[in-house]
Amino acid sequence: MPIPLSQPQFLAITNAASALYPADRDPFIAAVAAALEGQPIGDGIIGRIIRDVQRRFDHPEPERSPSRWDWDAD
């Protein structure tokens, strides 16, 4: 059964998925959908479910880039 989400709610879920490894994004969205099953749909419950489900997944480390103080001062 489809879950009635507003566009901002859908974007919150997809933005949270984009912070994960690419292979984890579909399972994350499926886990969020499963957790929303039978719940009253609102921004608060969606935020809590995103937070709870996201904790189950590993997050990639951001790429390290040199700071401006690390550059050579030629």
Image (spheres, rainbow, N blue to C red):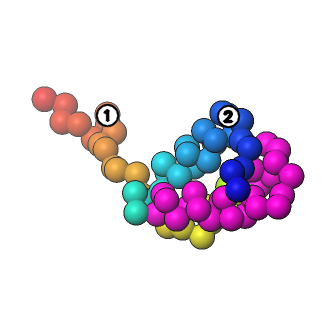
User: Could you tell me residue 6's position as x and y percent?
Assistant: 71, 35
Of labels 2 and 1, the one closer to you: 2
Residue positioned most to the bottom: 56
Quick one: label 2, few (<14), some, or many (20+) residues within 10 Å?
few
Q: Amino acid at mark 2?
A: Pro
Asked if residue 51 shows in the view, the reply is no
Q: Residue at x 76, y 61 (%)?
A: 37
Q: How many marks?
A: 2
Image quarter (top left, top right, bottom left or bottom right) of the C terminus: top left
13 on left or right of 26:
right
Q: Nearer the viewer, residue 4 or 69?
A: 4
Q: Which mark is residue 8?
A: 2
- Residue drawn at x 81%, y 52% is 45
Residue 23 in percent (x, y) is at: 40, 63
Q: Residue at x 66, y 58 (%)?
A: 33
Vertical position of residue 27 compared to residue 66: above or below:
below
Say whether residue 5 is left or right of residue 66: right
Look at 72% across and 64% down and name the residue there.
35
| Amino acid on which disc 1 is placed | Arg
Distance, label 2 to label 1, CA atoms, is 36 Å
The dominant secondary structure in magenta is helix
Question: Is 61 above or below relative to 66?
Answer: below
Q: Judge whether 56 appears above or below 2 on screen.
A: below
Q: Secondary structure at mark 1?
A: loop
| Dot 2: element | helix
Q: Quadrant of the N terminus?
A: bottom right
Res. 62 in view: yes
Residue located beneath label 1 in the image: 68
Q: Which residues are magenta?
A: 24-48
Q: Which residue is farthest front? A: 1
